Amino acid sequence: MKFKKWVSGTAAALLIATSLFGVAPLAQADEIQKRTIAEESIYDLLVDRFFNGSGENDYDTNTKDPSEFAGGDFRGLQDKLAFIEKMGFSIVSIGTIFDTEKYDGSMPTSYTTLEEHFGTAEEFESVIKAYKAKNMAIMIDFPLSNVSPNHEWAKDSAKQSWIASTNNGQVQWDLANEDVQAALIEAATEFVSTYDIGGIRLTNLADADTEFVNAMIEAVKDTKESLYVIANEESDANFDAAFSTATADVYRNIFKTVDMDSTKLMDPVAGDQPTQIMIDTLDTHRFTFDSANENMFPPTRLKMAMGALFMLPGVPVVQYGTEIAMNGEKAPDTHQFYNFKTDEELIDYIKNVQTLRNQSATLRNGDFEVITNENGLLVFTRTSDEEKWVIMVNNTSETQRVNLTPEQLGDDKALNGLLNEEKVRLNEKNVYPVILDREMVEIYQVKDDEGLNIPYMVALGLVYVLFIGFVVVIIKRGKKRRQEQDMQK
């Protein structure tokens, strides 16, 4: 069984590689054209819940109490760099990392000092450098309000006028106070100038004036021009990507089960600004929880959601643990310590889809056109001067067929399915019959129909050669073992 899975994985990797032959690597493309956040994908995690790389900072940790620190740290992030790189994410968002009284950073006590449970400044810098070497940027959260009553500013007698209120055990700053605004901007720009991060997510915007938020965005970008600045709340400020709670709800509700009205999937695509698209957040119940409540099989639902998420226009944001179907209704149950011993089927699926996206500028920012969008059946194209793709999302309970025409794709074309290895050609009725089983996503590359696909045949032949070689080795080992046994007798 393991060998069969290995052969299938090898074949898929070879077929994707041969299908993308001639496409410029991402790094080379970026040297020609500056990237925008619409080309990125974000992996959202909590440092404390990811991986424990060092026991030196494990004071007052308790892995049996989900509300306490569990031991994840900066070294853990560096140890698991290859794991995240494998899935193809370009930005790793690691939450609030300032001194905090809670594992998730929701009770910060400083805007300058790093949380000791996570590690040292030197270790953080090492993480940034290591990820940057692999073309991945580190993003951190910067809370504008809702801090611990023990925050260094809140305990400063000269800054008592900075406090607007205290609710739910947290301090809310007076964000209309010019001194508070100046102090927040100074703290953010100081952090950006100290650490070579690639992005900041401003959180707890509360009633912050748009003019102030824009001033903060401008200040940190003046410090580092390439910095991405986003938020996890709706705002009219000039963030690089918009956020909408309704958008996350739409994606979650459409994909948690089959045959749902999918027309609202287009809402985030309508605006000029790229939108963060996701199926849940670290502040909500897990998508696995939602799909299980619908009596659906979460891994299948997650494949549906991820396949669409990475192909639609926008900025895909994936919460840590989604790739292992992490469950939970609310924190801290939704913030489980990561289990690296789970099956990697979903991880490999995300890797394959993101490999396509990362290798094709067209899939990241090409023209977008909807062909069909009705009750869970979504077919759309991503097009540029260089290439054309057709993506079919069959989020229904039945096998679906869509007849594409030469007017839509061109004459003498062929569609190469890269996930399920299907090839579609023009038939006798002068249509391209695209057929897909229920609850599946397929990504088709539109190519000139040149008859036999030589790279495909070479890849398939190589798989068979590997298989035959494996069988020969097993037979030889068996013969040798029997000879040894005979000699012992």
Image (spheres, rainbow, N blue to C red):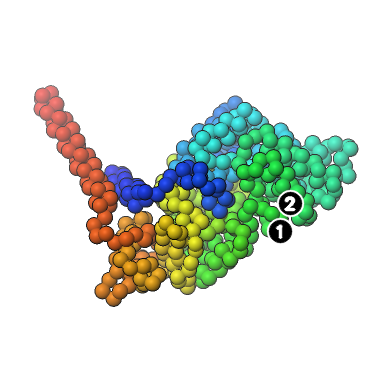
Cβ atoms under marks 2 and 1 closer than 8 Å: no
Q: Closest to the observer: 96 or 102? A: 96
Q: Residue furthest top?
A: 488
Q: Which residue is mark 2?
A: 214
Indicate the position of residue 409 as horizontal and vertical percent values.
38, 67
Relative to residue 84, is residue 48 drawn left or right? right
Q: Residues within 10 Å of mark 2 (few under 14, many from 20)?
A: some
Quarter in which the C terminus is drawn: top left
Q: Which of the 4 image quadrants contains residue 371?
A: bottom left
Res 401 seen here:
no
Q: Residue at x 53, y 33 (%)?
A: 130
Residue at image position (13%, 33%) is 479
Front residue (pair 210, 412): 412
Question: How many numbered circles are shown?
Answer: 2
Q: Badge 1: few (under 14), some or many (20 or more) residues near its Cα, within 10 Å?
A: few
Q: Nearer the viewer, residue 450 or 287?
A: 450
Q: Secondary structure at mark 2?
A: helix
User: Which quadrant of the view contains residue 246?
Assistant: bottom right
State whether residue 205 is above or below residue 261.
Answer: above
| Type of the residue with mark 2 | Asn
Residue 477 sits in quarter: top left
Say if residue 126 shows up in the picture.
yes
Whole-percent x and y of residue 55? 57, 28
Give the number of the disc on residue 279. none
Compared across the picture, whether 489 is left or right of 416 comes to left
Please tell me which residue is depicted at 32% across the width and 49% down the height of the picture. 18
Residue that mark 1 sits on: 236
Residue 345 spot, x, y in % from top left? 40, 49
Q: Amino acid at mark 1?
A: Asp
- Circle 1: element type: loop
